[in-house]
Amino acid sequence: MGKEMNYGEDYKSIPATSISSGMGISVLPDLYCHTIQIVNIHLVGDPETGDFVLVDAGMPDSADEIISVIEERFGKESRPKAIILTHGHFDHVGSIIELINHYNIPVYAHELELPFLTGVKRYPEPDSTVEGGMVAKMSKMFPNEPINLGNNVEMLPADGSIPHMPGFKWIHTPGHTPGHVSLFREMDGALIVGDAFVTVKQDELYKVITQKQEINGPPRYLTTDWHAAKESVKKLAALRPQAAVTGHGLPMTGETLSESLDKLVRDFDKIAVPDHGKYIN
């Protein structure tokens, strides 16, 4: 594995972090959320059995930290069965090539996300003019060239199942990207959101740094289809999740999650959609 893989030429470390960086939370016995700078990775599986997957692959240059977190939770020489990607933005695939080379494992993503993961297509440019704070203004510096995972990335099964994640189903939640997915387990209402919605105001630097918890739509500066994003939030709210881990921000559970999601659906245009920006119709 790995001979034909490469990052885009603009891949680089981003000097942004939060007070939660390096911290992990066991949301459920088999669902662990760990923050790397300003983004979360998730480990799904029982530490007692050692069978687990990694959801998303962190920031650039974070492979050593991810490997360390995995070993601390599952033991030395442990290895995920696969990496599941909610989408392919740089902060969710930042260390994926190093992880594939280290573990020799497959990666799964939605069919519509594959062009962005195989060097075929680049995402639309971040909108640094979008209404928002300093992170939005910084977004023009974020890596945007497509990575190429070659034949190391596979399409998620069409039946909604997720390899090595029994009980979970993937749900197509486009808007932030065309092939964005969220992962849901009906048995206990566990939801791995990705960036379909987040629990921090991701475009404002102060709130990113302090991780002030508040539900928001997908990060504004990288969301290009707001109609689809709104429908995706409605779809997830209808599931009535009991515990949600997001790509950015702290986990949210129980009544707080239910009330926050209801508010986001009700006031999506006010809370999530910026007043101006090049992707606002």
Image (tube, grey):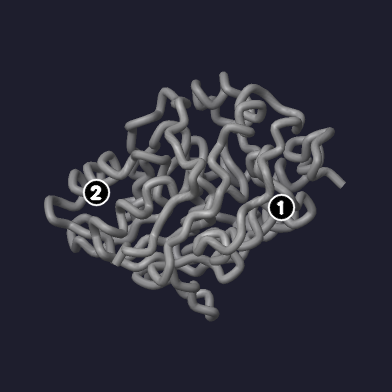
Residue at figure coordinates x 47%, y 48% from the top left:
92
Q: Residue furthest top?
A: 206
- Between the residue at mark 1 and the residue at mark 2, the CA separation in whole angstroms equals 32 Å
Disc 1 marks which amino acid?
Answer: Ala
Residue 221, given in percent of the width and then of the height, sits at: 67, 38
Of 75 and 5, nearer the camera is 5
Residue 235: quarter of image:
bottom right
- Is 173 placed left or right of 104 in the picture? right
- Residue 253 in view in this figure: no
Residue 217: quarter of image:
top right
Residue at figure coordinates x 61%, y 27% from the top left:
138
- Characterize the local packing of mark 1: few (<14), some (14-19) or many (20 or more) Cα atoms within 10 angstroms: many
Residue 159, given in percent of the width and then of the height, sits at: 53, 80
Of 209 and 261, nearer the camera is 209
Q: Residue furthest left?
A: 76
Disc 2 marks which amino acid?
Answer: Ile
Dot 2 lies on which element? helix
Of 272 and 67, nearer the camera is 67
Residue 70 — which label?
Answer: 2
- Is 124 placed left or right of 57 in the picture? right
Residue 84 — which label?
Answer: none
- Is 152 placed left or right of 269 in the picture? left
User: Mark 1 = which residue?
Assistant: 229
Dot 1 lies on which element? helix
Q: Quadrant of the N terminus?
A: bottom left
Q: How many marks?
A: 2
Give yes or no for contact between labels 1 and 2 (Cβ–Cβ under 8 Å).
no
- Characterize the local packing of mark 2: few (<14), some (14-19) or many (20 or more) Cα atoms within 10 angstroms: many
* N-term-proximal mark, 1 vs 2: 2
Residue 172, given in percent of the width and then of the height, sits at: 61, 65
